[in-house]
Amino acid sequence: MAVKAASGAATAKAAAGAAAVAPAKPVKPAKPSTRDQILTASLDLFNLEGFDGTSIAMICERVNIMAGNLTYYFPKKRDIVFAIRDDFDRQLSSLQSGMLDALLDEKRPPSPADTHQLLRTMMEIIWEHRFFFTSMMALHRLDRRVVIAFRQVEQQARVGLSQLVQKTVTDQVLSPLSYPNSVSALADNIWYIMWGCMFFQKVRDKEMEPAKSVVITTCLLQLGALLEPMLEPDFMAAYCREVTRNR
């Protein structure tokens, strides 16, 4: 009886050990909700075709739903734009409360790598929401509230850039700014180059979607050209190496 009990205990122990090392079943990622699928499809189409060039039927075809399913979540196309604007705002807020705030809290001056990473991340967020810039006139005609909501996001981005410029001046990375230049004026010019790149590339060739890597690299180098007179040559050279290495 003792032998049987020992044998049973050993068998149970072996089974428990096998269960412990058995590979876990892969967990399937949750399928995006219909609402999220509508927003993703709409953003892709707005960026590619423009706001005016995208119809409700095109969005429904992309998501494979009926028009009634779409209007259940978004009664009008402008409601989709407001939801995408909220996502744009969340991403910029996350950048500001994360990467930017961490950089501002550092005791050391921003490095070329720091500067490049922050500007590139902001450019990527702008790229993903570029229809706000390329379709600005259409959005203005649609509903002035859309433009006002977008300007609130824009103001947030410009404040963040002003904080970055102020730190680089305080830490003597940038040369002191003199009239007519200022912290806010330089931050505004950085912002204008960022979204101007998106607008120019789209207008220059309406039939061909510019490559993301090309647009972002071009923009980052143009920002370097703007800042070059105010930066030490070694800092500028290191910044340009970061841009070209990460394109």
Image (cartoon, rainbow, N blue to C red):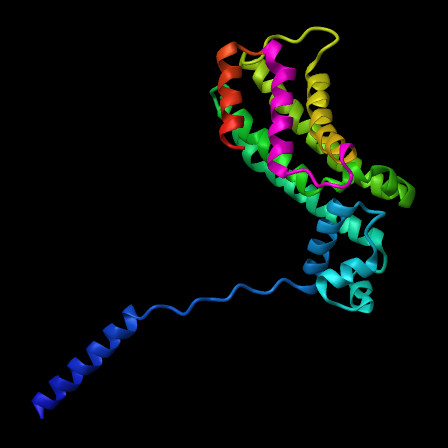
Res 60 → quadrant: bottom right
Instruction: Indicate the position of residue 84 as horizontal and vertical percent values.
Output: 73, 48
Q: Is residue 104 visible?
A: no
Does residue 35 lie above or below 147 as drawn? below
Nearer the observer, 219 or 31: 219
User: Is residue 20 left or right of 221 when viewed as pictured?
Assistant: left
User: Is residue 148 left or right of 167 when viewed as pictured?
Assistant: right
Instruction: Indicate the position of residue 82 as horizontal and vertical percent values.
Output: 79, 49
User: Is residue 106 left or right of 84 when viewed as pictured?
Assistant: left
Q: How many marks?
A: 0
Point 72% across, 66% down: residue? 64
Point 83% across, 49% down: residue? 53
Point 57% across, 17% down: residue? 168
Q: Is residue 81 magenta?
A: no
Q: Is residue 216 magenta?
A: yes
Instruction: Point out the stretch of residues depicted in magenta.
Output: 204-230
Quarter in which the N terminus is drawn: bottom left
User: Is residue 70 left or right of 33 when viewed as pictured?
Assistant: right
